[in-house]
Image (spheres, grey):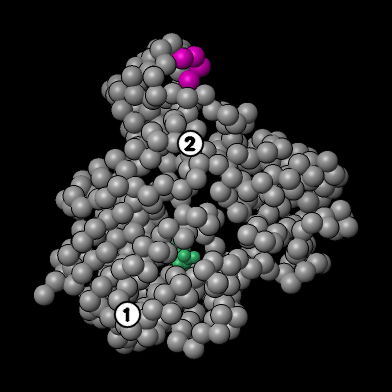
Amino acid sequence: MKNLEVEITNFDHFGRGIVKKEKPIFIDNALVGEIVEIEITKDNKKYSEGRVIKYIKKSPLRVESNCPFYDKCGGCDLLYLSYQEQLKYKETKVKEIIKKFSGLECVKEIVPTIQYNYRNKITLHVQKKLGYYQKKSYDIINIDNCLIADDRINALIKKLNTIDLNTITKITIRVSSKESMLVIEGGKLDIALFEEVDTIIVDNQVLKGRGYIIEEINNLKFVISPDSFFQVNRLGMINIYNQVLKYVDNDTKVLDLYCGTGTIGIYLADKVNQVLGIDINKSAINDALMNKKINNLENIDFKLGDVEDVLNNNSFKADCIVVDPPRAGLGNMVIKNIFKIQPQKLIYVSCDPVTLARDLNILKDKYDVVEITPFDMFSNTYHVECVILLQKKD
Ligand SMILES: C[S@@+](CC[C@H](N)C(=O)[O-])C[C@H]1O[C@@H](n2cnc3c(N)ncnc32)[C@H](O)[C@@H]1O
């Protein structure tokens, strides 16, 4: 197909420029008002996707990305916008989605994080060379530095690039404030080369250290083991948890649904009477139980299981329910159970504004949506988190 010259008229919720022809064309790295020459990379019945070949007129909002891998790497989407513009984009996106799908207008100003070096976890793939997957592909782009990763992760990426990785296929690097962990799949690693790393796990065998690392926040300790979810941005996590802490009332009974390693519940434990956390991931619940122990907490417990099943098969009482579901959101059954439990407060931590808006549209029947605060957790990507306070209607 011949290349096209087009003007970008809209910007979508995944950080792509849109051209409205007979059907829309979605174009990465293209801003509203820009005139670009594109080639069509995908042509579906309802939409096409294009790639910029040449910028004919650039937007005044465009900044040069300072990442040499940005054009090919599938990690960041918004590096061509200044951080202030990224924040504006995310706040507007949340406002638009919430208004469109739930009719609500109570979105507050976005809370920023840091733009670079925030990620405490990255996964590298190895196929002869070491790196990230390229955009929409399983081909590897070799990297020796990642702008959004912690400096200690970048030092390890550099070192890994200098050694023979033989049959290794995947390397995950995680760091906490004081410790680091390497998780290797598919082959051997000369661990003597990595004195600076606290724990090394190769093909599920702990070869060095405890097999997990510990993060410390506000004198609380949190275990991070290889298979458990842990928020990847420490500052973003603290901002969100402080918001939840502000919303919960003293001496209440709290249900922490989708609790992961129990971090939110543990953060609240000092203020409230009792917490019960529920999560489907066994490794996360094991970490949560360890977290309970190392923080000497008596008033928190955890249950392994699917939130929907556990709520369907038990009767709980709670003054406050905190939910932090994956992108799929809560869905009808979980909401039905929340309505049955009738907590005075519901605090919703969301990583997807679309499923959030869908859920709020049902929840607003029985709960007042008091305020929605967007939080930046993943700078330079289109992702945005939100914390929402809902109050039971009289
Ligand atoms: C966004 S994480 C939140 C974890 C935790 N609140 C935190 O801040 O670290 C979502 C969690 O939901 C859990 N999860 C996903 N589907 C689930 C389900 N159907 N029932 C229970 N937990 C689930 C995952 O294991 C994961 O720990």
What residue did someone put label 2 on? 77
Left or right: where 91 falls relative to 229: left
Amino acid of disc 2: Asp
Residue 19, given in percent of the width and then of the height, sits at: 33, 23
Where, by quadrant of the figure, is residue 139 drawn? top right
Q: What is the span of residues highlighted in magenta in the rendered image?
A: 51-55
| Residue ID at (21%, 69%) | 391
Residue 297, given in percent of the width and then of the height, sits at: 51, 84
> Quadrant where the C terminus lies?
bottom left
Provide the secondary structure element on which disc 1 rests. Answer: loop
Residue 11, given in percent of the width and then of the height, sits at: 34, 31
Amino acid of disc 1: Asn
What residue did someone put label 1 on? 250
- Say if 139 sits above or below 299 in the image: above
Sequence-wise first label, 1 or 2: 2
The dominant secondary structure in magenta is: strand
Residue 71, given in percent of the width and then of the height, sits at: 56, 28
| Residue ID at (41%, 12%) | 57
Left or right: where 117 falls relative to 125: left
- Say if 194 sits above or below 130 in the image: below
Q: Is residue 53 magenta?
A: yes
Left or right: where 237 falls relative to 145: left
